[in-house]
Amino acid sequence: MDTSTAQSIKLAIVSATGLSKDALHIYVGMAVYLTLIAVTRRLRPYIGWLVVFIIACAGEWVDRRDDIESLGYWRWQASAHDILNTLFWPTALTLLWLLKCRKKTSVRP
């Protein structure tokens, strides 16, 4: 079984950081989300969430291709788990932002 370039890069990052793949999903999701929010202050957090979702899905699409090529089937449960890990904190922060905006509009007469 050959390791694809994408998987080799992931393994190198895991080795260099000492973090698990699950932890890396969480960190990458937060880094992308917070970077987008910081760089474009006018960007609404739900747009940042959408970008993180698209990037997570693109990464899992690469994993899907690698799974089919090396295993003969797609481990879709692992992909769903990775997407949920990546989106957890961006989702929590986006929901908090939405609640904050909702409270501001409901307080005004």
Image (cartoon, rainbow, N blue to C red):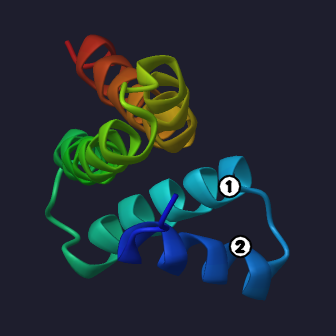
The kind of secondary structure element at disc 2 is helix
Looking at the image, residue 65 sits to the left or right of residue 4; the answer is left
Relative to 35, residue 29 above or below:
above
Residue 92 seen in the figure: no
- Label 1: few (<14), some (14–19) or many (≥20) C-alpha neighbours in 10 Å: some
Q: Residue furthest front?
A: 1
Earlier-in-chain disc, 1 versus 2: 2
Relative to 26, residue 90 above or below:
above
Mark 2 sits on what residue? 14
- Which quarter of the rendered picture does the C terminus lie within? top left
Residue found at x 31% / y 65%: 37
- Label 2: few (<14), some (14–19) or many (≥20) C-alpha neighbours in 10 Å: some
Looking at the image, residue 60 sits to the left or right of residue 31; the answer is left
Residue found at x 45% / y 42%: 90
Looking at the image, residue 14 sits to the left or right of residue 55; the answer is right
**Nearer to me, 79 or 67:** 67
Q: Are marks 1 and 2 in contact (CB under 8 Å)?
A: yes
Rounded to the nearest whole Å, what is the CA distance between mark 1 and mark 2?
A: 7 Å
Mark 1 sits on what residue? 21
Q: How many marks?
A: 2
Residue found at x 20% / y 42%: 50
Relative to 93, residue 98 above or below:
above
Q: Position of residue 40 (x, y in %)?
A: 19, 74
Q: Position of residue 58 (x, y in %)?
A: 22, 50
Q: Quadrant of residue 36?
A: bottom left
Residue 20 seen in the figure: yes
Q: Position of residue 77 (x, y in %)?
A: 50, 18
- Identify which amino acid the numbered label 2 is placed on: Val
- Identify which amino acid the numbered label 1 is placed on: Lys
The kind of secondary structure element at disc 1 is helix
